[in-house]
C-alpha cells in the first residue's frame, strides 16, 4: 500500500488512504480491539477494499475509536491508535494497520502493550525508528486519540451509546444500512456495494 497516498485529512482525525480523486470513498469507523473489525479486515470486505484502493478505484478513510478500553478495561485501543498515528507520519499507516489486525489479541485481553506494538512494528519494513519508538512509548498522539474518539461518538449511536458501533461503514457519505450490514463481511457482497456506488460510465 506504500504506492498510494496516506495522509491525515484537514479535520485532524480522518486518516485517508488512496487516490484523493477516486470515485468511491469508503469511510470506516473501527476500534483496534474490536473482533468484528478484525473479521471485516481479514476475511470480509477489507481485502476487497484494499484491491480497489490499489487500483485507484476507491479511497479508504478511517476514524479510529478507543471506546473498548473503557468498556473492557485497559489502554490497548488507545495505545494502538497512538501507534497507528505515529506510523502515518512515515507513510506506513496502511501496512501497520493490516499487521495489527492480523495479530489482534483476544478482545478481553489488553494485549496491545507498548512492547507488543513495537514488536509488531518490526514486521513493517522501515517503520521502526527512534522517533517512532519514542512516539509509542510516550503516547505522543494523545490529543489525536481523544479527538478521534469524539469524532466517532458524533457519527451516530448504537444500543443507546454514542458512536455507531464498529465497524461502521459509509460509502460515498451514506451509511451501509442494517439490512445490508452482513454484506460487508462477504467479499462478493462488499464488492457489489462498492460497484453500486461507482458513477455510471
Image: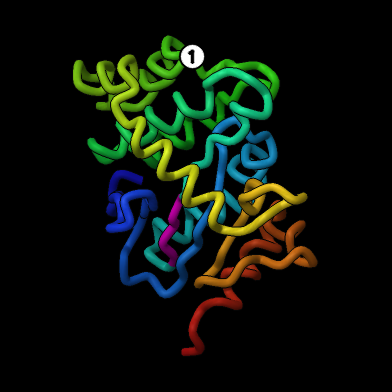
Image quadrant assignment for residue 132 = top left
Residue lying at 71% horizontally and 67% vertically, measured from the top left = 177
In reply to whether residue 59 is colored magenta, the answer given is yes
In the depicted view, which residue is nearer to us: 200 or 62? Answer: 62
Residue lying at 46% horizontally and 71% vertically, measured from the top left = 24
Residue lying at 60% horizontally and 17% vertically, measured from the top left = 110
**Residue to which mark 1 is pinned:** 113
136 to the left or right of 66: left
In the depicted view, which residue is nearer to us: 23 or 72? Answer: 72
In the rendered image, the residue lying farthest to the left is 130
Q: Is 9 located above or below residue 150 in the figure?
A: below
Image quadrant assignment for residue 176 = bottom right
In the depicted view, which residue is nearer to us: 2 or 34? Answer: 34
In the depicted view, which residue is nearer to us: 40 or 33? Answer: 33
Identify the element where label 1 is drawn.
Answer: loop
Residues shaded magenta: 58-62
In the rendered image, the residue lying farthest to the bottom is 201
In the rendered image, the residue lying farthest to the right is 179
Percent of width and height locating residue 78: 47, 28
160 to the left or right of 148: right
In reply to whether residue 99 is colored magenta, the answer given is no
Neighbour tally class for label 1: few under 14, some 14-19, many 20 plus, Cα within 10 Å: some
In the rendered image, the residue lying farthest to the top is 115
186 to the left or right of 60: right
Classified by dominant secondary structure, the portion drawn in magenta counts as strand
Q: Is 183 located above or below residue 129 in the figure?
A: below
Percent of width and height locating residue 121: 37, 22
Image quadrant assignment for residue 56 = bottom left
Q: Is 43 located above or below residue 52 in the figure?
A: above
Percent of width and height locating residue 30: 56, 44
Amino acid at each position: 500500500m506504500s504506492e498510494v497516498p496516506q495522509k491525515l485529512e484537514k479535520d485532524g482525525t480522518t486518516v485517508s488512504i488512496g487516490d484523493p480523486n477516486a470515485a468511491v470513498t469508503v469511510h470506516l469507523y473501527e476500534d483496534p480491539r474490536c473482533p468484528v473489525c478484525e473479521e471485516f479486515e481479514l476475511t470480509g470486505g477489507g481485502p476487497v477494499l484494499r484491491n480497489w484502493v490499489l487500483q485507484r478505484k476507491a479511497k479508504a478513510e478511517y476514524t479510529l475509536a478507543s471506546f473498548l478500553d473503557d468498556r473492557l478495561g485497559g489502554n490497548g485501543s488507545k495505545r494502538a491508535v497512538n501507534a497507528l498515528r505515529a506510523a502515518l507520519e512515515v507513510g506506513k499507516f496502511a501496512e501497520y494497520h493490516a499487521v495489527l489486525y492480523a495479530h489482534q489479541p483476544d478482545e478481553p485481553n489488553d494485549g496491545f502493550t507498548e512492547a507488543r506494538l513495537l514488536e509488531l512494528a518490526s514486521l513493517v519494513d522501515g517503520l521502526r525508528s527512534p522517533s517512532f519508538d519514542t512516539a509509542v512509548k510516550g503516547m505522543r498522539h494523545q490529543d489525536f486519540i481523544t479527538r478521534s474518539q469524539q469524532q466517532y461518538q458524533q457519527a451516530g449511536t448504537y444500543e443507546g451509546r454514542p458512536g455507531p458501533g464498529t465497524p461502521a461503514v459509509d460509502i460515498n457519505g451514506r451509511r451501509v444500512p442494517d439490512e445490508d450490514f452482513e454484506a460487508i463481511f462477504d467479499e462478493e457482497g462488499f464488492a457489489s456495494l462498492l460497484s453500486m456506488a461507482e458513477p455510471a460510465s
